[in-house]
Amino acid sequence: MRELVELLFPTRCLLCQRHGDLVCEACLCSLPLLTGPVCTTCGSPAAAGCRECVGRRLGFRSARSAVGYRRDVARAVGAWKEGGAWRMARVAARIIVGVVPRPAADAVTSVPPDRERALWRGHDPAGALAHELARTWQLPHQRLLERRLRVAPQKELDAERRRTNLASAFRACGRVPQAVVIIDDVYTTGATASVAALTLREAGARSVDVITFARTLRSRRPDDPARSSASVAQLESDR
């Protein structure tokens, strides 16, 4: 059956569109991995000092991401989330494990999707990624958050309006352990991750860390291939 499906619908690389693996070897080797110095709080590439989280009160202890959110990565994330490329969760998990150290946590959870959006997509990308990572790290995968209300799409809002938009968007469910790691697909401004982490802390967690597959990068250089742009923003997560 798998051979028939591949014959009728051959796999294309989500980044370069060539026939082959879901992410081909060449694209894997060229991914903008965030393996260098990063901010110990928000995970932004920063050898010294960080302008992204300075002066902000973030709900999580630390955030780490595996790759920079440039155009080809945004294309892959868009296909994963909106195009039904659900197998990308396993690929993303392998990439994360190669970059981000295993967290010191009691449980792994994920940012829950909007109910209507999840029904439309037919899958939960962040939840599937959390499942793969929990299995690899041999940690319990628990559903600890749920949506309390539907919020406006985040991608068209600035950082301050994102925080206001997300206020009281989540509630904790189940027994929240002491140390939790929240998994999501993309870290944009950190607004969603911060509110989700604060919700878990209010429910009893002492420390909450965040791990995502990708994160947006801020750059002054207009020719930087990893620089956030309007075209990339159109595919950004509502994070």
Image (cartoon, helix red, strand yellow):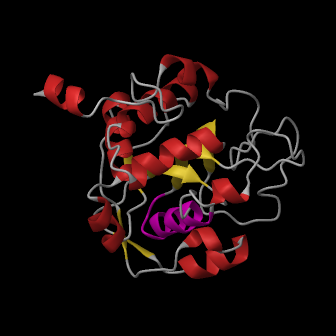
Q: What is the x, y in percent for residue 148?
A: 38, 79
For residue 193: magenta? yes
Is 207 in front, or is 149? 149
Q: What is the x, y in percent for residue 74?
A: 57, 46
Report the magenta residues as a range.
191-205
- In the rendered image, which quarter contains the C terminus? bottom right
Q: Quadrant of residue 54?
A: bottom right
Instruction: Identify the residue at image location x=45%, y=35%.
Output: 92
Instruction: Identify the residue at image location x=62%, y=66%.
Output: 191
Instruction: Identify the residue at image location x=34%, y=30%.
Output: 11
Is 67 in front, or is 137? 67
Q: Is residue 65 visible?
A: no
Q: Kindly give the residue lying farthest to the left in the view shown.
A: 1
- In the rendered image, which quarter contains the N terminus? top left
Q: Up-down: is 33 above or below 56? A: above
For residue 33: magenta? no
Q: Up-down: is 175 above or below 213? A: below
Q: Quadrant of residue 89?
A: top left
Q: What is the x, y in percent for residue 135?
A: 30, 33
Q: Is residue 78 visible?
A: yes
Image side of residue 218 versus residue 173, left or right: right
Q: What is the x, y in percent for residue 88?
A: 39, 38
Instruction: Identify the residue at image location x=79%, y=50%.
Output: 218
Image side of residue 129 versus residue 219, left or right: left
Kindly report the secondary structure that dominates the magenta region of the rendered protein.
helix
